[in-house]
Amino acid sequence: MSLRFDTRVAAAATAQDPRLMRQEFSRVLHVPARADGLKRHRLRFREVLYFKLKGTLEREGLVLSPEDRRAVYKVLTVKAGEVGGWRRTGRKLVRAGDVPITLDLTKIVHSTQSALRMVQRGEELIERLPGVCSGEPVFKGTRVPVVHLIEQFRAGVPFPEIAEDYPQLDEKALRYAELCSHMGQAPGRPPGPLKIRRTATAS
């Protein structure tokens, strides 16, 4: 993938906090934020993959030191031979030393690609119609506001329970809402409250 992704999209695809991702860039990786003339990060696929790998290792109880994180980032994103004892061979990440480590990245690569495609294609699943929910984004062919599902996922409602409550939505729509629940608030003003307008009828 040669595309670049903003931090919110990358965070959704990797189940990471976008604020912590920005802190990782500035405080650990020392990568300045600069894209399109603005002070922001636009991540390449391998940078997204770094955060996916980092988050996966941490959930498994393996927290890398800042030095190791910088080395892994460079090995993944730059065509470097070996950095800090780490090297990449195809889709395997190898750490030399007294206790050698070999990580197979195949599954993480595939799941990250799939999640990014899901986020990118999410707009195809929603529509905005003036006469439906005051123009708020809803899933196509329904009156289900996207934000309702996002908030339920953020509140910790289990996926099967949400799927049962919304039988009119297919798995793609539900997965898209689940991914969006990991995104931070979009830049700009927060959305206003949902307004319900009563249509006048002829007497």
Image (tube, rainbow, N blue to C red):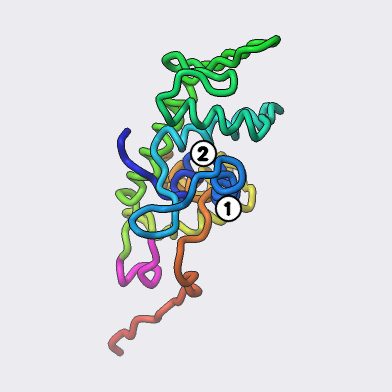
The residue at the point 30 percent across, 66 percent down is 129
For this rendering, which residue is in front, 122 or 13?
A: 13
Image height of 113 relative to 161, above or below:
above
In primary-sequence order, the first of circles 2 and 1 is: 2
Q: Is residue 65 left or right of residue 197?
A: right
The residue at the point 55 percent across, 30 percent down is 53
Q: Which residues are magenta?
A: 129-137
Q: Pointer 2: what residue?
A: 14
Q: Locate the N terminus and report the quarter of the image it occupies.
A: top left
Mark 1 element type: helix
Please name which of the two marks, 2 or 1, marks the residue nearer to the observer. Answer: 1
The amino acid beneath tag 1 is Arg
Residue 47 appears in the rendering: yes
Q: Pointer 1: what residue?
A: 19
Residue 8 screen position, x and y as percent: 47, 51
Q: How many residues crowd around disc 2 within 10 Å: few (fewer than 14), some, or many (20 or more)? A: many
The residue at the point 34 percent across, 81 percent down is 199
For this rendering, which residue is in front, 29 or 94?
A: 29
Q: How many residues crowd around disc 1 within 10 Å: few (fewer than 14), some, or many (20 or more)? A: few
Q: Quadrant of residue 196?
A: bottom left
Q: Residue furthest bottom?
A: 203
3D distance between C-alphas at marks 2 and 1 = 13 Å
The amino acid beneath tag 2 is Thr
Residue 142 screen position, x and y as percent: 37, 56
Mark 2 element type: helix
Is 149 magenta? The answer is: no
Q: Is residue 115 left or right of residue 202?
A: right
Give me the disc on residue 148: none
Q: Locate the C terminus and report the quarter of the image it occupies.
A: bottom left
Residue 162 screen position, x and y as percent: 54, 46
For this rendering, which residue is in front, 129 or 105?
A: 105
